[in-house]
Image (tube, helix red, strand yellow):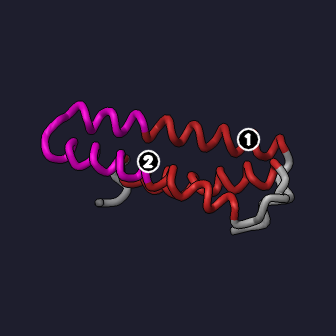
Amino acid sequence: MARTSSKTWPELASESWLLASDAAVVIWLRSMRLMMGGPLAAREAERMVSEKLTASMTLLPALMQGGLTQTPEALGAKALAHYRAPVAANRKRLSGSSRA
């Protein structure tokens, strides 16, 4: 991961906005899949819950790797990095860019 302690608040705000827009697309795509019903929807619902539990349980250890003296900016950048890859992977998978 790139150095996160040098992020400024405007950079974090911009990255947060981009992550939120990607997450909104994933929510929409998942909603479409769930509304279709069937075994694919059931697998997606199970996958969604599993991913959310994993992400929430691994966030605190990921944040604490830098110790208690981290700046708020560094913690914010780590939290964004923690969620960026899974959101991007889900967007790619659900949009049909890959098969999963």
Q: Which mark is residue 62?
A: none
On screen, 12 above or below 78? Answer: above
User: Where in the figure is residue 26, as x and y percent of width and height?
Assistant: 43, 41
Residue sitting at x 37%, y 38%? 29
Q: Are marks 1 and 2 in contact (CB under 8 Å)?
A: no
Residue sitting at x 70%, y 45%? 15
Quarter-wise, where is residue 2 in the image? bottom right
Q: Please check the rendered image and state whether residue 34 is part of the magenta-colored stretch, yes or no.
A: yes
Of residues 7 and 62, the one drawn nearer to the viewer in this rendering: 62
On screen, 95 above or below 82? Answer: above
Q: Residues within 10 Å of mark 1 (few under 14, many from 20)?
A: few
Bounds of the magenta span? Answer: 27-53
**Residue for badge 1:** 14
**Residue for badge 2:** 52
| Label 1 vs 2, first from the N-terminus | 1
Q: Please check the rendered image and state whether residue 29 is part of the magenta-colored stretch, yes or no.
A: yes
Task: Tell me the kind of residue under disc 2.
Answer: Lys
Instruction: Mark yes or no: residue 14 visible.
Output: yes
Residue sitting at x 50%, y 54%? 57
User: Where in the figure is residue 100, as x and y percent of width and height?
Assistant: 29, 60
Task: Tell me the kind of residue under disc 1.
Answer: Ser
